[in-house]
Amino acid sequence: MEQPIAASAAGMRPIGDAMALASVLQPLITAGGGEILVRSPWAWRAGRLTGAMATAVSPAPLVCTPRLARQVLGQMGLAITGQRRSGLDWLLCARPSGAAAAPPLVYENCTVSGSQCRIDGQVHAIRRGNWAFFVPALGIKILHARDARRFCFHESRPDDRTLATGDGSLVLGPYTLADWRAALATPVVRRAAENVVSARRLAAIAAGPAVGRAIAIGALSYGDGGPATPSAGFEIADLTGYVRKPATLAEDLDRAGVTADRIRSALRQQIGGYVSDLDSVVGVMPVDADAEVRDVESRLNAALSAAGP
C-alpha cells in the first residue's frame, strides 16, 4: 500500500475551502496520483473533545468532508480509482483521469430552440448564455457560433451593417467596434480551445469547475432556421452541486495563469465562489499558453474533419 498524502506537517486541521484543499493536494499531481486519508470534521471535533486525537493515525489525515475531497480531486484532473471506509475515515486512491489527453467527444448535430436543444436526436434542457450554453444532463458547454466563428446573442452586439461598414474606433460602452469585430471574427474552435486551457488552469487550483474532454459539434443550428455551422466546447462540471467557498480573487487568477476579461465579469459573476463565465467581447485568456491552445485547437479541427460535413 502506498503511503497516504498527509494533510500537513503540523497535523490535522479542518479544511473547508476547495482552493486550500487543492493546495494541500498538489503532491498528488507531482507524484502522478496516490492515496489520501480523509477524516470527517465531525469526527475531528469529537476527537478534540474526548482527547482521542492523541491516537490519530500517522501521517495525519485530511480533515474535510468526503464530498469536498472528491470534488477537488475531480477539479484537479484526478479520478478516484478506489476507496475504502472505516467509520468516519475514508481512504481514497486517485489517479490522473487522462481527460486532457483524450480525443474530443464528437456530436454530429445540435439544434438550439429556446431553453432546449436536440443533440443527436435527444432533447435536453439548457442554460443559455450570450456566448455559450450549458447542457446539465450531459455536463457540456457549447459555444454559440455563426459561419464557424464566435457569436453573441446579447442586445449590445452591433448589427451586421455596423460591423461591416462602421468606424472601428467607434466606442460602444467598454468596447470599440474593432473589439467586437475581432471577437466575432475569431474561429469558434480557437475560442473553445482558449476556454479549455483557461478552465483547466482554474480547475487545477479549485477556482473553477472540473473540466473533461473537448467537444466538437459537427453542425450547430438554431430554431430560426438559419444555416448550420460547426462549433465546439468542453465537458465541465455543474457548479450547482459544488461546496461553496470564498470568492475567487484577481490574484487567484494570476496564480492560475489566466487573465480576467476586460469587464471582469469572470470575477463579478461567480457561482458559489467559483469562476464560470469565461466569455465576453474581450474574454478570459490563458497566459503564455499558445502551444497548449494550438494542441486543443488542432485536436478539435481534426475531430471535425473526421466527422465530415
Image (spheres, rainbow, N blue to C red):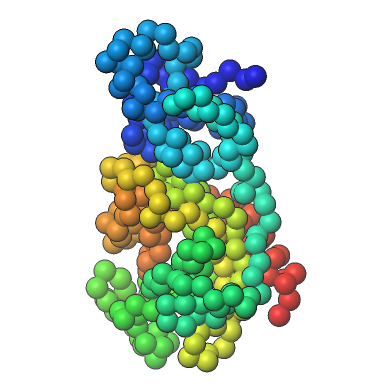
283 is higher (above) or lower (below) than 30:
below
Residue 72, given in percent of the width and then of the height, sits at 46, 39
Q: Position of residue 219 (x, y in %)?
A: 61, 79
Q: Quadrant of residue 4?
A: top right
Q: Quadrant of the C terminus?
A: bottom right
The residue most toward the left is 173
Tell me if I can see residue 3 in this picture.
yes
Residue 12 horizontal side relative to residue 173, left or right:
right
As drawn, 23 above or below 257: above
Q: Nearer the viewer, residue 60 or 26?
A: 60
Q: Residue at x 32, y 45 (%)?
A: 244
> From what the image shows, is residue 115 above or below residue 105?
below
Residue positioned 66% across, 49% down in the render: 101
Q: How many numbered marks appear?
A: 0
Q: Quadrant of residue 168?
A: bottom left
Where does residue 25 sit, x and y in percent of width and height? Answer: 48, 30
Q: Residue furthest front?
A: 87
In-front residue for pair 66/96: 66
Q: Is residue 148 visible?
A: no
Q: Residue at the far top: name it.
A: 54
Please give left or right for residue 52 compared with residue 234 in the image: left
Q: State the quadrant of the N terminus.
A: top right
In this view of the protein, which residue sits in the foreground, 166 or 263? Answer: 263
Tell me which residue sits at (27%, 56%) in the image.
268
Residue at 38% over, 60% down: 277
Query: Residue 127 at x, y = what percent?
Result: 41, 69
